[in-house]
Amino acid sequence: MFTGLLSIMIETGILGLIVLALAIVFGAFIILRSLKNFLVNAVVGLAILFLANAIAGLGIGYSLLVILICAIGGALGAILIILLHFTGIVI
């Protein structure tokens, strides 16, 4: 009697571990996919800001806040920083 119950408990535990492992792999895939999109967005935003500084000679400083806005906002963040610079608001 106990061996049958023990066998069922072990099988249930193994099945639970398999489901947990699949959930972890799926979650890691989703995180890495969104991280890739974030990194591409950040590189594009920082490249736009760098090119605007280099070509137009805007003189926008690279403070931590400016880099964070460009990294999180991407191209729109870089455009926002440039527009703020034209209006005289320095970040």
Image (cartoon, helix red, strand yellow):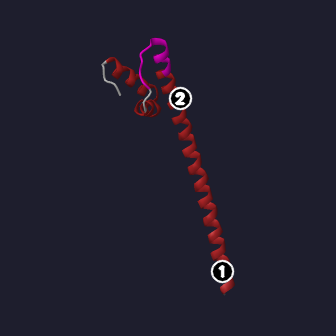
Residue that protrudes farthest toward the bottom in the picture:
1
Check whether the beta carbons of the residues at disc 2 and disc 1 lie within 8 A of each other.
no
Residue drawn 30% across the image and 20% down it: 88
Q: Is residue 45 or residue 56 the one in the foreground?
A: 56
Residue that protrudes farthest toward the top in the picture:
56
Q: Which residue is mark 1?
A: 6
Identity, as a three-letter code, of the amino acid under mark 1: Leu
Residue drawn 61% across the image and 52% down it: 25
First of labels 2, 1 by sequence position = 1
Residue 54 is covered by the magenta coloring? yes
Q: Secondary structure at mark 2?
A: helix
Determine crowd level at label 2: few under 14, some 14-19, many 20+ residues with C-alpha closer than 10 A.
some
Q: Which residues are magenta?
A: 50-61
Residue drawn 41% across the image and 22% down it: 79
Q: Is residue 27 or residue 10 the one in the foreground?
A: 27
Residue drawn 65% across the image and 68% down it: 14
Where does residue 42 sit, x and y in percent of width and height? 50, 31
Where, by quadrant of the figure, is residue 82 drawn? top left
Q: Quadrant of the N terminus?
A: bottom right
Residue 56 is covered by the magenta coloring? yes
Q: Quadrant of the C terminus?
A: top left
Where, by quadrant of the figure, is residue 78 drawn? top left
Where does residue 62 sit, x and y in percent of width and height? 44, 27
Where does residue 61 sit, x and y in percent of width and height? 42, 24
On residue 43, the disc is 2
Answer left or right for 1 relative to 74.
right
Identity, as a three-letter code, of the amino acid under mark 2: Val
Select label 2 or label 1 by which is in front: 2
Where, by quadrant of the figure, is residue 76 drawn? top left
